[in-house]
Image (spheres, rainbow, N blue to C red):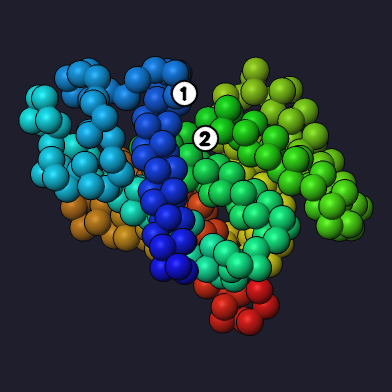
Amino acid sequence: METLIYIIVFIIGALFGSFYTLATYRIPKHQDITHTHSYCPNCDHKLGFFDLFPILSYIFLGGKCRYCKQKISPRYILFEILSGAVFLTIFYLMDINIYTVTVTQICKFAFFALYITFIFLTLGIDKENIKIEKSVSVYGIIISLIYIAYLCIVEKANIYRYAIYIVFYILVLILDTISLKKFAKNRYINGLVFTLITMAIFTGELISLISVIFTTIIILLYVMSKKLKIIKNKRLKTQNKICKNIPIAFYMGVTNIITFIFVPIILNIR
């Protein structure tokens, strides 16, 4: 029975992953993500029922569109597999048993499903566009406020701790409103701050701090490797463009998921 439950959870995660691929493609293009039927991005043909099975459709179609035969980006199946794996891992680590499951466990898992959605949308869009969409940040703020309300009302959490996060949200929102009109480049920085606050609310200060440290290390290594290649190829004029093309939110989202799963296991604090 447990194996069947795990399979179902993985499938649910894969379905979410299928939605993530759709959303990360459409949101930057300001397209509808809920009512418009799925279509092939190459030929615009509407996809049929059998084209939309997570993972299996990609495999059976050989990674190609059924209609135009163009190759489908592997990020589709990658998102679906990773999303299914993350859902299953968190479900397992929460030690949810179908026979003894509680309402609290269900609520916690549901909230983290919403949080995972926020992270996947953030890192997916940033990887492709070097951009943090404001609509995704707003979604993160909304689920954070609902989660805070749940923690304070149902689980009697320390309201003062979360009040600080709410103050941070308000301050960054004010800064975003004032500065964005004059300095458009601040949108990305403000988006990173929103993302970090949301991470801290859901995964805690320690996990968020470790995520930032690992992200910093990855970025430093990335910049160093790029500069070495530039120096080697004597293309000095391109050095200034290196830092402008780093998807910081992508790396921060990936490291946050990894640290959230593995650090508590290593430290035995979950």
Q: Which residue is mark 2?
A: 132
Which of marks 1 and 2 precedes in the sequence? 1
Residue type, mark 1 in image: Thr
Judge whether 180 appears above or below 161 on screen.
above
- Report crowding for label 1: few under 14, some 14 to 19, many 20 or more residues within 10 A (C-alpha): few
Q: Residue at x 71, y 23 (%)?
A: 177
Disc 1, SS: loop
Give the side of residue 1 with respect to residue 21, left or right. Answer: right
Q: Residue at x 47, y 69 (%)?
A: 2
- Report x, y in % for residue 185: 55, 29
Q: Residue at x 52, y 53 (%)?
A: 252
- Report x, y in % for residue 132: 52, 35
- Report x, y in % for residue 255: 50, 60
Q: Of the numbered discs in the image, which one, if any, rests on residue 34?
A: 1
Q: In this orientation, does residue 216 appear?
A: no
Comparing labels 2 and 1, the label whose residue is closer to the camera: 1
